Amino acid sequence: MKRSDGRCRSATKRSNVDRPELDNLLDLCRSKTIRKVLVTDFSRLGRRRSETPALMEAITQAGVSIYAHNLGGPPLRLETLQSNGKRNPVASIVIAVMIEIDAMETERLSERILSGLDQARRNGTRLGRPPGTKKAKEELVAAYPGVVKDLKNGLSVRQTAVIRKVSTDTVQRVKRAMPKAKTDVNADTLE
């Protein structure tokens, strides 16, 4: 998936992630520095079902062949471009099927994990962090003095996270744990 600046982003279930390795790969392909890309599994090129074909198309359009070596079972070698530079129609069909099979396996794995978690809950197993591993408010504030300083200086949560190289969730937790500023109110001024 392309950003407005032409660099690669990959969408995962949780967030969009920059993938500089893919940017480098595409730069090498466009500059004709490489002629082939070796992969062991096509699904590793993209994080979502729709990303893989789009990335493969970009690489192939740059005139670079994607070579898959030993795709399970008996040795199966598959290349997206033929030796004359034309697309390999058999590879296109096989790749499309393999991408769909990978997507089905991913969905099945996700269902199995969720089923296992549900079963563990029904059996009374406690999930998540062990008791006592969560920091108290005072400890959290003491552990991130830079975050506290930036928040007190009026920086946003996102700005603070970028500057301090922590997640926005961490900044939010520190913000909630910070003592509220007490305002001195003079009873004489209220009349």
Image (cartoon, rainbow, N blue to C red):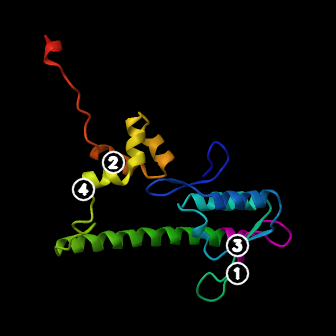
The residue at the far right in this view is 84
Classify mark 3: helix, strand or loop.
helix
Classify mark 4: helix, strand or loop.
loop
Query: Quadrant of the rendered structure where residue 111 is?
Result: bottom left
Distance from disc 2 to disc 1, alpha carbons, whole Å, reads 53 Å
Query: Quadrant of the rendered structure where residue 17 is?
Result: bottom right
What residue does disc 2 label?
A: 174
Distance from disc 3 to disc 1, alpha carbons, whole Å, reads 12 Å
What residue does disc 1 label?
A: 77
What residue does disc 4 label?
A: 136
Q: Do the residues labelled 3 and 2 touch (CB within 8 Å)?
A: no
- x 63%, y 61%: residue: 53
Dot 3 crowding, Cα within 10 Å, few <14, some 14–19, many 20+: few
- x 29%, y 43%: residue: 178
Which residues are drawn in magenta? 78-92
Distance from disc 4 to disc 3, alpha carbons, whole Å, reads 60 Å
Q: Which of marks 3 and 2 is in front?
A: 2
Identify residue type, mark 3: Val
Relative to 119, say whether 148 is above or below.
Answer: above
Dot 2 crowding, Cα within 10 Å, few <14, some 14–19, many 20+: many
Identify residue type, mark 4: Ala
Q: Nearer the viewer, mark 3 or mark 1?
A: 1
What residue does disc 3 label?
A: 90
Q: Do the residues labelled 4 and 1 touch (CB within 8 Å)?
A: no
Q: Which of marks 4 and 3 is in front?
A: 4
